[in-house]
Amino acid sequence: MISAAAVRTIVLKEFQSELRTRYALNALLMFVVTTLSIVLFSVGSENVSTDVLSGILWIIIFFSSMSGLSRTFVSEEERGTTMTLQLLAPPLVVFFGKLVFNIVLLFILNVVAIGLYMLLIGGFAVKSYGIFCLTIGLGTIGLASASTLIAAIISKANTKGTLYPVLSFPIMLPLLLTVITATRRSVEGAVFSEAIGEFQVLFSYIVVMLAVSYIVFDYIWRD
Amino acid sequence: MLKIVLGIWLTIVIVVAFAFPIVPQPQQWFEYPVIPGLEEKARILFFHVPMSWTTVVAFFVSMIYGIRYLKTKNLRDDMRSVSSAGLGLMFCVLATVTGSVWAKFNWGSFWNWDPRETSIFILLLIYGAYFALRSALEDEAKRATLAAVYAIIAGVTVPFFIFVMPRIMASLHPEPIVNTEGKVHMNATMLIVFLSSLAGFTALFAWMLQLRIRLARLEQHYYQKEN
Amino acid sequence: MYDFLSGHALYIVLTIVLICWFGIFFYLYTLDRKISRIEKQLGNMS
């Protein structure tokens, strides 16, 4: 059905086309830098609570992903390569290939964003690294899953750019709220067991998103 | 005939919702108990909750017709899906606004991000996204397919909320008192009026949906005749 | 009656709500009748 080799081929193809233009990477990084600067500027030397800081971090991550993760599908439509891809690979292979690519891309983005965030904003000092890392890991996978699926939908529409956050936000809200809460816990230095609830939610979110994608992607992809 | 019955039914529900007095110790069958902190404002229970219920029902109806479209590829199912979504959006706006106004009088501010408020807001966003998506697609078949897909994705996320929210937002201020009490033991009279209102609103929704669908069919007929 | 109403605001609200409701119901009902009539006409034609 889905062969790992086929998926790997798609992933490699994505990386190659990305490396050629570096469009998404640039857009993402510039977006992170810009938003981070604005946040730094407005926060200044004030003591902002951990709630707000956690929220801002994920705002930055969410909107950065909105500016870059749709590229995988939209560029296919723009370059007219969708049909070729439809002929060459079964739909689910295409989906998982692009999903893996997006996960990696988002992961890189998150590392950069979080690194800068922790460096530049004094109030954001992580105390429970266990919770933090698992949150970032699960959050990245969840965010990538939902955004890849929505990216597939909007690639077929007319007003792709503005539609992407509009469609994604309600779907990602459970994820965002959970992940913000978990981040806050990790900054406040909570014990790992306290965050189990959040991890359960994140894990089930990923499972649900992947299951839905599995069922529904066929309909999106085929003309 | 049935519609007249519905009309009378809801009229009675409205009158009863307002007219039955709220007394501390209900002795007669037609009295409601006082809920501490709410008193007269508790009457909103009979209107606001059924509207929220109806908007969720409308969404699931829309999702089900969407799924049917994906199977049958019959545009008629898509048309039913949109009609239901339109009604759902209207009920959602009404539910949000009534809830917000009530919150202002009860808790002092129009919006508090309490779990239930947040979930009705998200439903509003989902409806908005659904129509935004539809307006961005011109080809009928593609529009129907993608709208149905989005309805499914959103529909899967909604139950998530019902179970996710209580876990995360346990720390926020408590749910409206009536809800916790209502689950456990709502006064019998109130329960009957409430359930009647629920049934009435659902029937109203079904009737309005049927009207919209029939109207859409007639429109289609008219445009076909023109061509 | 004015005295009664000005003391019991609740019944003013009830009256207003009932008026709104009757208006909505009337609209829906006439709409239903119009649609039925057109459907019957179309049924006769085709």
Image (cartoon, coloured by chain):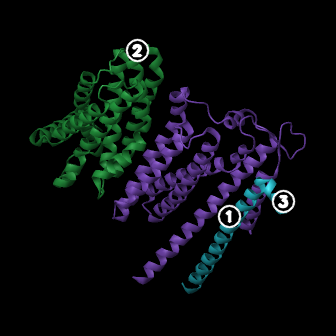
Chain colours: A green, B purple, C cyan
> x, y (%) of residue B16?
79, 53
> x, y (%) of residue A15?
15, 37
Looking at the rendered structure, the kind of residue marked 1 is Cys
Element on which disc 1 rests = helix
> x, y (%) of residue B58?
56, 53
Query: Which residue is tagged 3?
Result: C3
The residue furthest left is A20
Give the quarter of the figure containing the N terminus of chain A.
top left
> Label 3 lies in what chain?
C
Q: How far apart in space, not on screen, are marks 2 and 1 (Cα)?
A: 55 Å
Looking at the rendered structure, the kind of residue marked 3 is Asp
Q: Is residue B104 above or below residue C17?
A: above
Q: Are marks 2 and 3 in contact (CB under 8 Å)?
A: no
Q: Residue at x 9, y 41 (%)?
A: A20
Query: Which residue is tagged 2?
Result: A189
Sooner in the amino-acid sequence: mark 1 or mark 3: 3
2 vs 3, front mark: 3
Q: Is residue A12 left or right of residue A182?
A: left
